[in-house]
Image: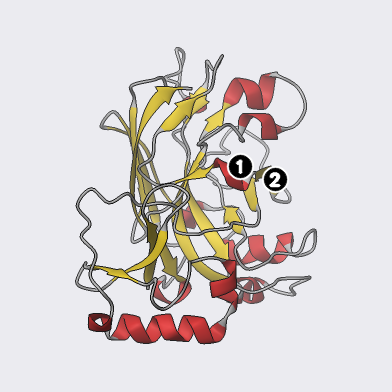
Amino acid sequence: MKLLRVGTAGAERPALLDRDGTLRDLSGIVPDIDGDLLADASALARVRAAAENPGVLPALDATGLRIGPPLGRIGKIVCIGLNYHDHAAGAEIPAEPILFFKAPDTVVGPDDTVLVPRGSRKTDWEVELAVVIGRTARYLGSAEEGLAHVAGYATAHDVSEREFQIERGGTWDKGKNCETFNPLGPWLVTADEVADPQALPLRLWVNGELKQNGTTAEQIFPVGEVVRYLSHFMTLYPGDIINTGTPAGVAMGQPEPKPYLKAGDVVELEVEGLGRQRQELKDA
Protein backbone atom coordinates (compact mmCIF):
# COMPACT_ATOMS: atom_id res chain seq x y z
CA MET A 1 0.00 0.00 0.00
CA LYS A 2 0.98 3.60 -0.58
CA LEU A 3 -0.24 5.58 2.42
CA LEU A 4 -0.03 9.34 2.68
CA ARG A 5 -1.42 12.36 4.52
CA VAL A 6 -2.85 15.37 2.74
CA GLY A 7 -3.98 18.84 3.70
CA THR A 8 -2.64 21.93 5.40
CA ALA A 9 0.26 21.58 7.82
CA GLY A 10 -0.95 20.33 11.18
CA ALA A 11 -4.36 19.33 9.82
CA GLU A 12 -3.49 16.50 7.44
CA ARG A 13 -5.90 13.63 6.88
CA PRO A 14 -5.03 10.05 5.97
CA ALA A 15 -5.21 8.94 2.36
CA LEU A 16 -4.36 6.04 0.08
CA LEU A 17 -2.95 6.08 -3.43
CA ASP A 18 -4.69 3.20 -5.18
CA ARG A 19 -3.17 1.08 -7.92
CA ASP A 20 -4.82 3.22 -10.61
CA GLY A 21 -3.16 6.34 -9.22
CA THR A 22 -6.36 7.73 -7.69
CA LEU A 23 -6.08 9.46 -4.34
CA ARG A 24 -8.56 8.01 -1.84
CA ASP A 25 -9.75 9.40 1.51
CA LEU A 26 -9.06 7.09 4.47
CA SER A 27 -10.43 9.38 7.17
CA GLY A 28 -13.67 7.40 7.39
CA ILE A 29 -11.70 4.28 8.32
CA VAL A 30 -8.78 5.48 10.44
CA PRO A 31 -8.09 8.81 12.16
CA ASP A 32 -4.49 9.12 11.00
CA ILE A 33 -1.43 7.29 9.73
CA ASP A 34 0.80 7.04 12.79
CA GLY A 35 2.39 4.60 15.18
CA ASP A 36 -0.96 3.68 16.69
CA LEU A 37 -2.22 2.56 13.28
CA LEU A 38 0.95 0.64 12.47
CA ALA A 39 0.73 -1.25 15.77
CA ASP A 40 -2.99 -2.07 15.39
CA ALA A 41 -3.42 -5.21 13.31
CA SER A 42 -7.19 -4.85 13.06
CA ALA A 43 -7.01 -1.23 11.89
CA LEU A 44 -4.36 -2.13 9.32
CA ALA A 45 -6.56 -4.98 8.13
CA ARG A 46 -9.40 -2.50 7.53
CA VAL A 47 -7.07 -0.31 5.49
CA ARG A 48 -5.84 -3.31 3.48
CA ALA A 49 -9.40 -4.42 2.78
CA ALA A 50 -10.23 -0.95 1.51
CA ALA A 51 -7.07 -0.90 -0.60
CA GLU A 52 -8.19 -4.12 -2.29
CA ASN A 53 -11.58 -2.58 -3.05
CA PRO A 54 -10.75 1.12 -3.39
CA GLY A 55 -14.15 2.01 -4.82
CA VAL A 56 -15.49 2.00 -1.25
CA LEU A 57 -13.27 5.02 -0.49
CA PRO A 58 -14.14 8.56 -1.61
CA ALA A 59 -11.84 9.92 -4.30
CA LEU A 60 -9.96 13.13 -3.53
CA ASP A 61 -9.21 15.88 -6.02
CA ALA A 62 -5.42 16.16 -5.89
CA THR A 63 -5.37 19.52 -7.70
CA GLY A 64 -3.59 22.00 -5.46
CA LEU A 65 -3.74 19.60 -2.52
CA ARG A 66 -0.69 19.71 -0.27
CA ILE A 67 0.97 16.40 0.53
CA GLY A 68 2.20 16.31 4.10
CA PRO A 69 4.60 13.89 5.78
CA PRO A 70 3.16 10.37 5.41
CA LEU A 71 3.47 9.69 9.14
CA GLY A 72 1.97 11.66 12.02
CA ARG A 73 3.04 11.83 15.66
CA ILE A 74 6.55 10.58 14.89
CA GLY A 75 8.32 9.18 17.95
CA LYS A 76 12.03 9.56 17.29
CA ILE A 77 14.23 9.84 14.22
CA VAL A 78 17.47 7.87 14.44
CA CYS A 79 19.99 8.53 11.68
CA ILE A 80 22.95 6.51 10.43
CA GLY A 81 26.07 8.36 9.27
CA LEU A 82 28.61 7.21 6.68
CA ASN A 83 26.57 4.16 5.73
CA TYR A 84 27.45 3.89 2.02
CA HIS A 85 30.73 2.53 0.75
CA ASP A 86 31.04 5.23 -1.93
CA HIS A 87 30.16 8.05 0.50
CA ALA A 88 32.73 6.76 3.02
CA ALA A 89 35.47 6.41 0.37
CA GLY A 90 38.71 7.87 1.70
CA ALA A 91 37.54 7.59 5.30
CA GLU A 92 37.81 4.72 7.72
CA ILE A 93 34.86 2.36 7.24
CA PRO A 94 32.86 2.39 10.49
CA ALA A 95 33.13 -0.82 12.51
CA GLU A 96 29.68 -0.12 13.93
CA PRO A 97 26.89 2.20 12.76
CA ILE A 98 27.42 5.90 13.50
CA LEU A 99 24.30 7.30 15.20
CA PHE A 100 22.78 10.75 15.55
CA PHE A 101 19.25 12.03 16.06
CA LYS A 102 16.89 14.42 14.36
CA ALA A 103 13.93 15.86 16.23
CA PRO A 104 10.46 14.99 14.88
CA ASP A 105 9.73 18.71 14.45
CA THR A 106 12.28 18.85 11.59
CA VAL A 107 9.86 16.80 9.46
CA VAL A 108 7.90 18.57 6.72
CA GLY A 109 6.09 17.44 3.60
CA PRO A 110 7.97 16.28 0.50
CA ASP A 111 7.33 19.49 -1.45
CA ASP A 112 7.39 22.00 1.40
CA THR A 113 9.88 24.85 1.49
CA VAL A 114 13.28 24.14 3.05
CA LEU A 115 14.71 27.04 5.04
CA VAL A 116 18.40 27.95 4.87
CA PRO A 117 19.31 28.73 8.50
CA ARG A 118 20.42 32.21 9.48
CA GLY A 119 24.19 32.40 9.29
CA SER A 120 24.44 29.25 7.18
CA ARG A 121 27.24 28.93 4.66
CA LYS A 122 27.21 25.16 4.17
CA THR A 123 23.67 23.81 3.81
CA ASP A 124 23.91 20.43 2.12
CA TRP A 125 21.65 17.79 0.55
CA GLU A 126 21.33 14.05 1.34
CA VAL A 127 18.81 11.68 -0.26
CA GLU A 128 18.04 8.75 2.06
CA LEU A 129 15.92 5.67 2.51
CA ALA A 130 13.73 6.11 5.60
CA VAL A 131 12.62 3.03 7.52
CA VAL A 132 9.41 3.21 9.56
CA ILE A 133 9.11 0.89 12.55
CA GLY A 134 5.87 -1.06 12.93
CA ARG A 135 6.52 -3.30 15.95
CA THR A 136 8.26 -2.63 19.25
CA ALA A 137 11.87 -3.80 18.94
CA ARG A 138 14.06 -4.73 21.90
CA TYR A 139 17.28 -6.76 21.79
CA LEU A 140 16.59 -8.38 18.44
CA GLY A 141 18.71 -11.39 17.61
CA SER A 142 19.12 -11.18 13.84
CA ALA A 143 18.83 -8.97 10.78
CA GLU A 144 15.84 -11.05 9.71
CA GLU A 145 14.10 -10.10 12.95
CA GLY A 146 15.02 -6.50 12.22
CA LEU A 147 13.25 -6.58 8.86
CA ALA A 148 10.21 -8.19 10.48
CA HIS A 149 9.80 -5.09 12.65
CA VAL A 150 9.66 -2.71 9.67
CA ALA A 151 6.22 -1.37 8.72
CA GLY A 152 7.34 0.40 5.57
CA TYR A 153 9.69 2.74 3.76
CA ALA A 154 9.74 6.34 2.55
CA THR A 155 11.94 8.85 0.76
CA ALA A 156 13.74 11.22 3.14
CA HIS A 157 15.89 14.30 2.65
CA ASP A 158 18.42 14.59 5.49
CA VAL A 159 19.25 18.26 5.00
CA SER A 160 22.44 19.21 6.87
CA GLU A 161 24.40 22.35 7.74
CA ARG A 162 28.01 21.20 7.63
CA GLU A 163 29.61 24.13 9.47
CA PHE A 164 27.11 23.74 12.32
CA GLN A 165 27.59 19.96 12.23
CA ILE A 166 31.38 19.72 12.13
CA GLU A 167 33.05 23.06 12.86
CA ARG A 168 31.07 24.43 15.80
CA GLY A 169 31.97 21.84 18.43
CA GLY A 170 29.87 19.27 20.20
CA THR A 171 27.83 16.65 18.38
CA TRP A 172 26.49 16.48 14.84
CA ASP A 173 22.98 17.25 16.06
CA LYS A 174 23.23 21.04 15.81
CA GLY A 175 23.81 20.74 12.05
CA LYS A 176 20.95 18.30 11.59
CA ASN A 177 18.04 19.80 13.51
CA CYS A 178 17.37 23.14 11.87
CA GLU A 179 13.79 23.94 10.95
CA THR A 180 12.47 22.00 7.88
CA PHE A 181 15.59 19.79 7.71
CA ASN A 182 13.76 16.48 7.17
CA PRO A 183 11.30 16.45 4.25
CA LEU A 184 9.58 13.06 4.24
CA GLY A 185 7.37 11.27 1.73
CA PRO A 186 5.31 11.51 -0.36
CA TRP A 187 4.27 7.99 0.60
CA LEU A 188 4.74 5.42 3.29
CA VAL A 189 5.06 2.26 1.19
CA THR A 190 4.31 -0.82 3.24
CA ALA A 191 7.08 -3.37 3.59
CA ASP A 192 5.21 -6.05 1.63
CA GLU A 193 5.51 -3.90 -1.50
CA VAL A 194 9.30 -3.49 -1.23
CA ALA A 195 10.76 -6.79 -2.41
CA ASP A 196 14.32 -5.95 -1.36
CA PRO A 197 15.25 -2.79 0.56
CA GLN A 198 18.87 -3.39 -0.50
CA ALA A 199 18.06 -2.93 -4.19
CA LEU A 200 16.60 0.58 -4.31
CA PRO A 201 18.12 3.29 -6.53
CA LEU A 202 18.36 6.76 -4.95
CA ARG A 203 18.82 9.99 -6.92
CA LEU A 204 19.00 13.71 -6.18
CA TRP A 205 19.15 16.78 -8.44
CA VAL A 206 19.98 20.41 -7.65
CA ASN A 207 18.60 22.91 -10.14
CA GLY A 208 18.14 20.06 -12.60
CA GLU A 209 21.71 18.74 -12.31
CA LEU A 210 22.08 15.16 -11.09
CA LYS A 211 24.21 15.17 -7.93
CA GLN A 212 23.58 11.79 -6.30
CA ASN A 213 22.93 8.53 -8.12
CA GLY A 214 23.33 5.51 -5.88
CA THR A 215 21.70 2.34 -4.65
CA THR A 216 20.95 0.89 -1.23
CA ALA A 217 23.01 -2.13 -2.31
CA GLU A 218 26.00 0.05 -1.33
CA GLN A 219 24.95 0.31 2.31
CA ILE A 220 27.63 -0.78 4.76
CA PHE A 221 25.00 -1.79 7.32
CA PRO A 222 21.81 -3.00 5.61
CA VAL A 223 18.35 -2.21 6.88
CA GLY A 224 17.74 -5.37 8.89
CA GLU A 225 21.10 -5.13 10.61
CA VAL A 226 20.57 -1.46 11.43
CA VAL A 227 17.25 -2.23 13.13
CA ARG A 228 18.78 -5.16 15.02
CA TYR A 229 21.76 -3.08 16.13
CA LEU A 230 19.71 -0.12 17.30
CA SER A 231 17.42 -2.38 19.33
CA HIS A 232 20.37 -3.17 21.63
CA PHE A 233 20.86 0.50 22.53
CA MET A 234 17.30 1.82 22.57
CA THR A 235 13.76 0.53 22.27
CA LEU A 236 12.25 1.17 18.87
CA TYR A 237 8.51 1.81 18.85
CA PRO A 238 5.86 1.89 16.10
CA GLY A 239 6.11 5.28 14.46
CA ASP A 240 9.85 5.69 14.98
CA ILE A 241 11.91 6.45 11.86
CA ILE A 242 15.44 5.45 10.86
CA ASN A 243 17.21 7.51 8.18
CA THR A 244 19.68 4.99 6.80
CA GLY A 245 22.40 7.18 5.27
CA THR A 246 23.21 8.72 1.92
CA PRO A 247 25.31 7.74 -1.12
CA ALA A 248 28.20 9.78 -2.53
CA GLY A 249 27.59 13.12 -4.21
CA VAL A 250 26.85 15.54 -1.38
CA ALA A 251 28.19 19.10 -1.62
CA MET A 252 30.71 18.51 1.19
CA GLY A 253 32.44 15.92 -1.00
CA GLN A 254 32.78 18.19 -4.06
CA PRO A 255 35.90 20.16 -5.08
CA GLU A 256 36.23 23.77 -3.98
CA PRO A 257 34.28 25.94 -4.23
CA LYS A 258 31.77 23.48 -2.85
CA PRO A 259 28.27 24.07 -4.27
CA TYR A 260 26.35 24.38 -1.01
CA LEU A 261 22.68 25.22 -1.19
CA LYS A 262 21.34 28.77 -1.10
CA ALA A 263 17.99 30.50 -1.29
CA GLY A 264 16.40 30.04 -4.72
CA ASP A 265 17.89 26.60 -5.34
CA VAL A 266 15.51 23.74 -6.17
CA VAL A 267 16.25 20.22 -4.93
CA GLU A 268 14.48 17.16 -6.34
CA LEU A 269 15.04 13.63 -5.06
CA GLU A 270 13.60 10.15 -5.18
CA VAL A 271 13.99 6.61 -3.97
CA GLU A 272 12.71 4.33 -6.71
CA GLY A 273 9.21 3.08 -5.94
CA LEU A 274 8.85 5.35 -2.91
CA GLY A 275 8.04 8.62 -4.64
CA ARG A 276 9.67 11.91 -5.52
CA GLN A 277 10.20 15.17 -3.63
CA ARG A 278 10.75 18.77 -4.76
CA GLN A 279 11.79 21.64 -2.51
CA GLU A 280 12.62 25.26 -3.15
CA LEU A 281 15.02 26.79 -0.66
CA LYS A 282 14.37 30.12 1.03
CA ASP A 283 16.18 32.09 3.72
CA ALA A 284 14.91 31.56 7.25
- Residue nearest the viewer, comparing 229 with 107: 107
Question: Which mark identifies residue 112?
Answer: none
Say whether residue 187 is visible: no
What kind of residue is marked 1? Leu
Residue 125, image x, y percentages: 46, 33
Q: Please tell me how crowded label 2 is: few (under 14), some (14-19), or many (20+) other residues with Cα within 10 Å.
A: few
Tell me the SS state at disc 2. strand
Nearer-N-terminus badge (2/1): 1
Task: Name the spot of residue 140 as percent of width and height, x first.
Answer: 74, 73
Q: Name the residue tied to disc 2.
A: 98
Discs 2, 1 touching: Cβ within 8 Å: yes
Quarter of the image holding residue 28?
bottom left
Query: What amino acid does circle 2 point to?
Result: Ile
Task: Name which quarter of the figure residue 53 lies in.
Answer: bottom left
Q: Secondary structure at mark 1?
A: loop
The residue that disc 1 covers is 82
